[in-house]
Image: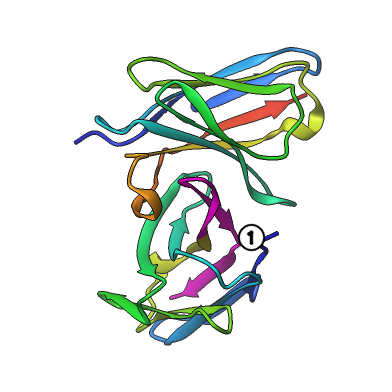
Amino acid sequence: KAGVTQTPRYLIKTRGQQVTLSCSPISGHRSVSWYQQTPGQGLQFLFEYFSETQRNKGNFPGRFSGRQFSNSRSEMNVSTLELGDSALYLCASSWGDRGPGNEQFFGPGTRLTVL
Amino acid sequence: KQEVTQIPAALSVPEGENLVLNCSFTDSAIYNLQWFRQDPGKGLTSLLLIQSSQREQTSGRLNASLDKSSGRSTLYIAASQPGDSATYLCAVRKRSGGSNYKLTFGKGTLLTVNP
């Protein structure tokens, strides 16, 4: 069974631009969660999508948004990029409907650098 | 608000040594706790998942314990090897509303095992 895939693996953008990251979950998984990882703040939860609906949201500004498609693939968009948005962005998939048993499986991440 | 702390932030040991990584959390009302490994620039690999009703879990040279009432978990690595060098993260899962559950991560312990 294929794991979680993320594209692209690396991105370099300049301040003010926008970026879209993609995540394909494990086949059959309906939940996709996004995390931002920086050396200073560690791993922080951005949002979770389940069956094309945002189900949970972390404490990030509205510049960070996402969506999920009917095949469970998810995209995350960041508009008006700032230097502080440079980070490793990880997505994780799970079944999504098994309560606390929803073990998450992580992708390799997208490394975003904002210049 | 759930906070997860990992001590030490970094640890360097000679090959063959047994070691313990610590994780503490402020809200003991968790459903489970998960230990992950992260290699540089890569995603997270799940190592052990302990349900709140369990005291410990073992996988090969790894043993994780959980004391929910005191808000502590330890990851014991026996006979460490250079290939164990990585960042180890713990994360706790707690209900975030309705049937939703959220993972909160510690900032990790960077382990270096010297040959």
Q: Amino acid at mark 1?
A: Lys
Name the residue located 66 percent from the left edge and 61 percent from the top edge. Answer: B2
Would residue A115 be counted in the magenta stretch? no
Residue A62 is left or right of residue B61, and the answer is right
Place of residue B85 in the rendered image (x, y in percent of width and height, measured from the top left): 46, 66
Decide which of B83, B47 is in the foreground and name it: B47
**Is residue A24 placed above or below A38 in the rendered structure?**
above
Residue B107 is left or right of residue A33, and the answer is right
Q: Which residue is mark 1?
A: B107
Place of residue B47 in the rendered image (x, y in percent of width and height, measured from the top left): 36, 63
Rendered image coloring scheme: rainbow
Place of residue B32 in the rendered image (x, y in percent of width and height, measured from the top left): 43, 65
Q: Quadrant of the N terminus of chain B?
A: bottom right
Residue A95 is left or right of residue A109, and the answer is left
Looking at the rendering, the stretch of residues picked out in magenta corresponds to B93-115
Q: Quadrant of the C terminus of chain B?
A: bottom left
Q: Quadrant of residue B18?
A: bottom left
Q: Quadrant of residue A21?
A: top right
Query: Disc 1 on helix, strand or loop?
Result: loop
How packed mark 1 is, by other alpha carbons closer than 10 Å (few <14, some 14-19, many 20 or more), is many
Decide which of A49, B5 is in the foreground and name it: A49
Decide which of B36, A52 is in the foreground and name it: A52
Name the residue located 49 percent from the left edge and 23 percent from the top edge. Answer: A53
**Is residue A62 placed above or below B80 in the rendered structure?**
above
Name the residue located 80 percent from the left edge and 25 percent from the top edge. Answer: A82
Main SS type for the magenta part? strand
Place of residue B105 in the rendered image (x, y in percent of width and height, measured from the top left): 58, 57
Q: Chain of mark 1?
A: B
**Is residue A59 placed above or below B18 in the rendered structure?**
above
Would residue B105 be counted in the magenta stretch? yes
Q: Residue furthest left?
A: A1
